[in-house]
Image (tube, rainbow, N blue to C red):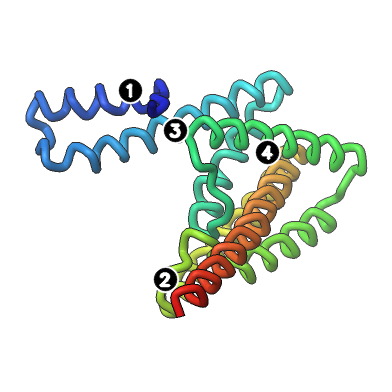
């Protein structure tokens, strides 16, 4: 029997309500249900980030982490969890890693020059590997367009990090740590992408 999560139930209730109110067409209900699931999942991840950030007395880090993933990672690609529950768990574990890195950066007393260097190095690797996994079917021109978007978003985050560093070094560190998580997701996604390509080649060899 298929396991039904609370998120899916809520999405179905929202979609059914929209159909009954004749706001959407019943023929498009599955599309809107999927969209509702994504919105609920996004909101849940933001809430989890804020709660964990509050526990570490750094809600700003939770907001920055969410925004970096919502902007940079969605374009760059990378590993994606197979279920919403696993997605939430990975999100929380990754955020704990971000908080650990922030504590390490504070202990090391990283200055603005080192922060800039770290941001640039991370961004170079992110741009080089982008896009990963969920962009596999993209045409070459579209992939180039995605790379340009990744570069622009990355530069904006670097500028933001350097700007807020002078207001709050911890906030600047949060940007760097979040970008490192994005790069980790991309490396993991790249490995999965390679395995998928290998399986496809094996299937083609079996057919021939």
Query: Which residue shows up at 38% across the image and 26% down it?
Result: 1
Q: Secondary structure at mark 2?
A: loop
Residue bearing the label numbered 4: 94
User: Can you give x and y, in whole percent of width and height, for residue 74 in the image?
Assistant: 49, 52
Q: Residues within 10 Å of mark 3 (few under 14, many from 20)?
A: some
In the shown orientation, is residue 57 left or right of residue 132?
right
Residue bearing the label numbered 3: 41
Marks 4 and 1: which is nearer the front? 1
What is the CA distance from the residue labelled 2 to the residue labelled 1? 33 Å
Q: Quadrant of residue 132?
A: bottom right
What is the CA distance from the residue labelled 2 to the residue labelled 3? 26 Å
Q: Secondary structure at mark 1?
A: helix
What is the CA distance from the residue labelled 4 to the residue labelled 2? 28 Å
Residue bearing the label numbered 2: 138
Q: Residue 69, can we see it? A: yes
Q: Quadrant of residue 29?
A: top left
Residue bearing the label numbered 1: 9
Q: Secondary structure at mark 4?
A: helix
Q: Quadrant of residue 60?
A: top right
């Amino acid at each position: 029997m298929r396991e039904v999560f609370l998120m899916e139930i809520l999405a179905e209730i929202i979609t059914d309500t929209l159909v009954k109110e004749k706001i959407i067409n019943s023929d498009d209900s599955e599309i809107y249900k999927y969209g509702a699931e994504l919105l609920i999942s996004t909101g849940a991840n933001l809430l989890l980030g804020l709660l964990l950030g509050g526990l570490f007395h750094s809600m700003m880090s939770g907001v920055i982490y969410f925004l970096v993933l919502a902007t940079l990672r969605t374009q760059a690609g990378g590993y994606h969890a197979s279920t919403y529950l696993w997605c939430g768990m990975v999100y929380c574990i990754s955020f704990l890693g971000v908080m650990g890195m922030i504590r390490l950066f504070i202990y090391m007393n990283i200055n603005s020059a080192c922060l800039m260097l770290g941001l640039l190095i991370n961004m170079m690797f992110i741009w080089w590997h982008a896009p990963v996994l969920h962009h596999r079917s993209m045409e070459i021109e579209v992939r180039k367009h995605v790379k340009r978007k990744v570069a622009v978003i990355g530069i904006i985050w670097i500028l933001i990090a350097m700007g807020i560093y002078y207001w709050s070094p911890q906030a600047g560190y949060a940007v760097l740590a979040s970008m490192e998580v994005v790069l980790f997701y991309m490396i993991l996604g790249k490995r999965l992408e390679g395995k998928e390509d290998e399986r496809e080649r094996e299937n083609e060899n079996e057919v021939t």
